[in-house]
Amino acid sequence: METQFFLITDPAAQTEDVAAAAAILRSGGLLGIPTETVYGLGANGLDAAAVRRIFEAKGRPQDNPLILHIPEAGWLERYCRNIPPAARLLAQAFWPGPLTMILQRRENVPNAVTCGLDTVGVRCPDHPVTLAILRAAGVPAAAPSGNLSGRPSPTCASHMLEDMDGRIDGLVDGGPCGVGVESTIIDLTTPIPRLLRPGGLPLEQLREVLGEVAVDRAVTSPLAAGEKPRAPGMKYRHYAPKAPVTVVTGEGRRTARYIRRNLAGHMGVICFDEYADQFPGCVVEAIGSANDRAEQARRVFDALRAFDGTDVEAIYAQCPGDAGLGMAVANRLKKAAGFQVVALGEDGE
Ligand code: TXA
Ligand code: MG
């Protein structure tokens, strides 16, 4: 299959390109779409056959459900029932934006999207190009991140093309993603809302609107053998470069020293900018200043992806704490490491 490429910088002016991309969705094709978090691999979310093609193109496990992308909160009623007041509050506060809500689904949402669950994840992405395409298509897009299963999520069109060229009908380049990690997922079907995946919207902001929010264990810990996470995708070792990754948590100078002392052979290091010159002979990917978690979020997947082009034998990663976007960055690094974590305290050794 030849992948048709669209570069859309101004959806209001490029109405023909928007219509052509929307036509791919409407006709059951696969379309790479930009969002503020990461690029997505979209198909008409009401067309089960089209949705099944997503799983084939990605090599995605059949038990991992997809998120429905809608252009406005007003579409929630079409696909969800028993919508709690919390969902309206969150939509008002954070949509369009990097937040996915798990709600009870209606019958018109195919099993192919939800993998047979009675809930569905819904989000309204904050990207003018994709919002225009969804409106023109008049259907929601079921879309996982646009990487091959197990690879880091793509944060620009060229990364998506690396994984998907020839496997999808079209790819819309809408520029690099501003957030860089996937959406935050919150389950609103439980008595206390529950964070299933930390992402582009920090937990603190959810708590400001909702009060109490529980954090699912799968966010911070590896699952026990046979344990079932509430977000099925959390059980897979995601985002993983070929070389094994070890995450080192704690204060920056200490983690840098620890990594230096443990270097052996041809190594890769993911670090904060301040420490980038401290690992001579290593392949170094800096992900932003130690205090700039938004920049770390934008660059973490690119750093993981960059190591696949190298022959490093192992990778060490400095890791931010859990405040703000740090929780999402740390979660992606720890998942890449299969939760192989060395925890150093803040001082003393
Ligand atoms: O930012 C994002 O969310 C990106 C962009 C493209 O929108 N999408 C994305 O999709 O990250 P994906 O498929 O890579 O991750 C979706 C996660 C998976 O862990 C899946 O298991 C979980 O959402 N999920 C989907 N539907 C669910 C449901 N009904 N209940 C619980 N978890 C669900
Ligand atoms: Mg994904």
Image: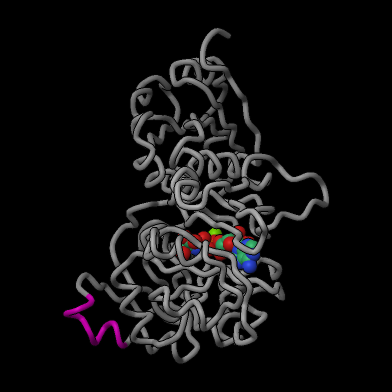
Q: Is residue 36 left or right of residue 144?
A: left
Magenta-colored stretch includes residue 16: yes
In front here: 70 or 244?
70
Q: Quadrant of residue 101?
A: bottom right
Q: Is residue 148 visible?
A: no
In front here: 228 or 58?
228
Which residue is rendered at x = 54% and y = 14% of the image? 261
Q: Is residue 329 visible?
A: yes
Q: Where is residue 169 shown, x and y percent of the image? A: 44, 81
Picture quarter with ligand 2: bottom right
Identity of the residue furthest to the top in this view: 348
Q: Where is residue 164 shown, x and y percent of the image? A: 47, 69
Q: Which residues are magenta?
A: 11-19
Identity of the residue furthest to the right in this view: 226
Coloring applied to the structure:
one colour
In front here: 147 or 92?
92
Magenta-colored stretch includes residue 258: no
Which residue is rendered at x = 59% and y = 65% of the image? 102
Q: Quadrant of residue 189?
A: bottom right
How many marks on residues? 0
Q: Is residue 2 left or right of residue 102?
A: left
Which residue is rendered at x = 52% and y = 62% of the image? 86
Rendered position, 77 above or below 187: below
Which residue is rendered at x = 50% and y = 31% of the image? 321
Q: Where is residue 333 shown, x and y percent of the image? A: 54, 40
In front here: 257 or 308?
257
